[in-house]
Image (cartoon, rainbow, N blue to C red):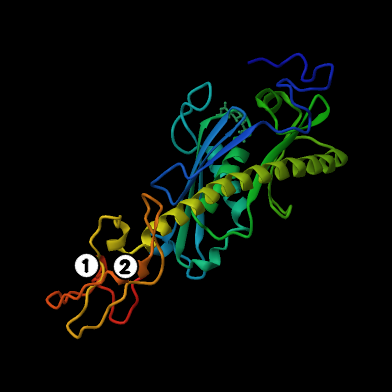
Amino acid sequence: MSKPEKFFDENGLRLDGRRVDEIRPMKIEVGVLSRADGSCYLEWGNNKVLAGVFGPRELHPRRMQRPDTAIVRYRYNMAAFSVEDRIRPGPNRRSTEISKVSREAFEPVILTHLYPSAVIDVFTEVLQADAGTRTAAINAATIALADAGIPMKGLVSACAVGKVDGKLVLDLGKDEDNYGDADLPVAMTQDGDVTLIQMDGNLTQDEFKEAMELVKVGCKQILDIQREALKSKFDQFDTEEIEEETVVEAPKSEVEIDETVEVETEVVVTEEEEVVETEEEEVVDTEEEEVVDTEEVEEEVTADDENDEEPDKNTDDEDVEEGETNE
Ligand code: CDP
């Protein structure tokens, strides 16, 4: 690919039609890997990144453990097929450096002291690269950490800012990254504290200040997308939970009740002729959504001296201790 003749059109728009303060479209999917404790798939322009988090779990070998805190390991890796020229598999100088600075970007936010002697592993895999992969990986990693339930002070959002043809631009594209004058990847907490900053190229002090203001705007936009992705995942989770609870709460024998069910199977009289009452709660028939009124059931109680079996005994709860209520 050769250097483009110009980076801006007559309207001041960039090669891909964006304004100088506009980020590329970002799409986030939460919880895409079933083997990981937390995961995320993120697309940002033509970047495609996968992140998986494992832990906190006991660190082996034990000599590497820290008795007062968990350690965080972070791996940034580019798939061999992620760029035009095949990348040799395995770590290299660039990926080792990116892994280190990215791990440090999370250090101020992860509450590692809650998990002494443990390790939290963060893996990020760049499946398709198109400039800004370290920031894309950080954005995916923070979502995977949240998905894994790792306690954090807040989310981390990352974006690059740079200079192209003397103009500051947000979220550099591939040509802008390759042929621009400066590239400044930045990560920050949701409170605006910078946790990663690197710079390639040159900026004046004023440009630097302006660039930091611009990148703050970018990180804020990304934070909103990240929050939205997490919210939609956990909103959906909440609804599923409620639906499940509705089914679980119904006593097993009553879940299948319909109008044809014999009442004797529900309520019996013990040897001492004591009526054992069914629970007074209303029970929802999950198929028909009809309410079975337990008072009606009581009316049809028949004494059965020979049947001294306890009513509603849920065999699944055999190991419930005496006196413990069966919820
Ligand atoms: O990806 P990021 O901007 O964080 O890092 P970079 O080192 O500035 O790389 C910029 C881009 O160059 C990457 O996103 C890839 O598209 C490309 N690249 C490549 O084609 N081959 C490499 N070995 C490394 C990077």
In the rendered view, would you say 61 is above or below 10?
below
Counting from the top left corner in percent of width and height, residue 183 is at 72, 34
In the rendered view, would you say 41 is above or below 193?
above
Q: Quadrant of ligand 1?
A: top right
> Which residue is found at the position 63% from the left and 16% from the top?
1
The residue at label 2 has a CB less than 8 Å from ligand 1: no
Residue 277 image label: none
User: Position of 25 compared to 253: left or right?
Assistant: right
Residue pointed to by mark 1: 264
Image-quadrant location for residue 279: bottom left
Counting from the top left corner in percent of width and height, residue 176 is at 71, 25
Counting from the top left corner in percent of width and height, residue 233 is at 53, 47
Q: Which quarter of the figure is the C terminus placed in?
A: bottom left
Note whether residue 172 is visible: yes
Q: Residues within 10 Å of mark 1 (few under 14, many from 20)?
A: some
Residue 297 image label: 2
